[in-house]
Image (tube, helix red, strand yellow):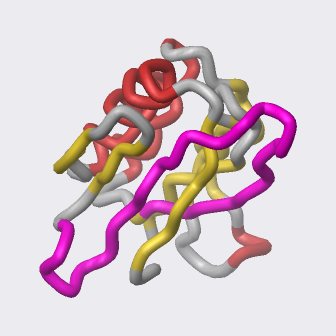
Amino acid sequence: MFDHLSLPVTDIPRARRFYDAVLAPLGIPRVWAEDRALGYGPRDTGAAYLTLRLSPAASPPAAHTAFRAPSRQAVHAFHQAGLAQGGTCDGPPGPRPHYGPGYYAAFLLDPDGNRIEAVHR
């Protein structure tokens, strides 16, 4: 769980397509969009949210964010959607017992190289 997180991206339209696709199966909506930033999750409610901000390509991003998934099926849908939108597999959906009992996750690198994960426990 996180309160809020901001990830740098180099292309807002590409990031919008990618994150709209991978976060939809997890029930995380895009709630606002600007020319240089996007926001996901319930903003200004005290709940966690994600911001994507335009960053120059000269400063490559390197972040890891794990999103809660409501089911194993949502983990699979997250992974498939990310691959369809130009993401790279960084770990297919499956159990990760070394992270804890019942830990089921998939990992992607987004088009800017950020490592994202969907996890169901």
Q: Residue at point 70% right, 33% down?
A: 112
Tag count: 0
| Region of the chain picked out in magenta, as a range | 43-67
45 up-or-down from 36: above or below: below
Residue 44 within the magenta-colored segment of the rendering: yes
Q: Is residue 4 left or right of residue 100?
A: left
Q: Give the main secondary structure of the magenta stretch.
A: loop
Task: Tell me which residue sits at (36%, 33%) in the image.
Answer: 35
For the residue pair 6 and 116, the one nearer the viewer reads as 6
**Of residues 13 and 97, which is closer to you in this image?**
13
Would residue 98 appear left or right of 81 to someone viewing this image? right
The image quadrant of residue 83 is top right
Q: Position of residue 111 (x, y in %)?
A: 66, 26
> Does residue 20 appear to the left or right of 67 in the view shown?
left
Residue appearing at x 60%, y 15% in the figure: 86
Query: Residue 47 colored magenta?
Result: yes
Asked whether 25 or 76 is in front, the reply is 25
Residue 69 place in picture, x, y as percent? 37, 58
Residue at point 66%, 38% (across, down): 108
